[in-house]
Image (cartoon, rainbow, N blue to C red):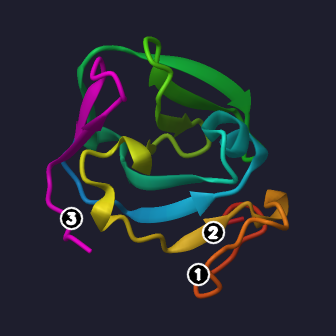
Amino acid sequence: MNAITTPFSGGCACGAIRYESTAEPVMMLHCHCRDCQQSSGGPFSSFVIVPTEAFKVLQGSLRFHASPSEAGGMTRRGFCSDCGSPVMGKPDAVPQFVAIRTASLDDPSWFNPQVDVWTSDAHPWDQMNPALPKFEKYPLS
């Protein structure tokens, strides 16, 4: 596994969106909630969580889809309007953080998940790493 270097960058599949984070992640996780399943097309989404002020879109403009969050407010999922690649999420409940989709990173090799969240929505066929702490919903709820 490679080490995290900051700033780190990423973007969408077609190259229209480019972003950078000037801070290391405060957390790395897999989210198994239904919204993440549906927006990713898979059993979960993987995220690196960074401070909002550290995340900057350098090129292009994200399109957002909002869905209600059990933690309050909405979760706004940013994606490329050209290719549809999911890039990041902005939960109203924790405005100080941005959740970057791990698959959008230029170098995702350093991703090291620390927890599984929303395991209450996980499918029985979703084989989670037994070594990771599990939370039925949010880790702080």
Within the image, what quadrant is residue 39 found in?
top right
Q: CA distance from mark 2 to mark 1?
A: 7 Å
Residue 50, how many percent across, how many down?
A: 36, 51
Q: Which residues are magenta?
A: 1-20
**94, 32: nearer the viewer:** 32
Looking at numbered disc 1 in the image, what kind of residue is underneath it? Answer: Leu
Query: Taking 18 as reference, is 118 left or right?
Result: right
Q: CA distance from mark 3 to mark 2?
A: 21 Å
Asked if residue 135 can be seen in this view, the reply is yes
Q: CA distance from mark 1 to mark 3?
A: 20 Å
Give me the residue at 66% from left, 47% from top: 42
Q: Earlier in the sequence, mark 2 or mark 1?
A: 2
Q: Earlier in the sequence, mark 1 or mark 3?
A: 3
State the quadrant of the N terminus. bottom left
**Circles 3 and 2 in contact, beta carbons < 8 Å:** no
Q: Any mark on residue 132, and which?
A: 1
Give me the residue at 32% from left, 56% from top: 108
Residue 107, how many percent across, how many down?
A: 25, 53
Looking at numbered disc 2 in the image, what kind of residue is underneath it? Answer: Asp
Give me the residue at 57% from left, 72% from top: 115
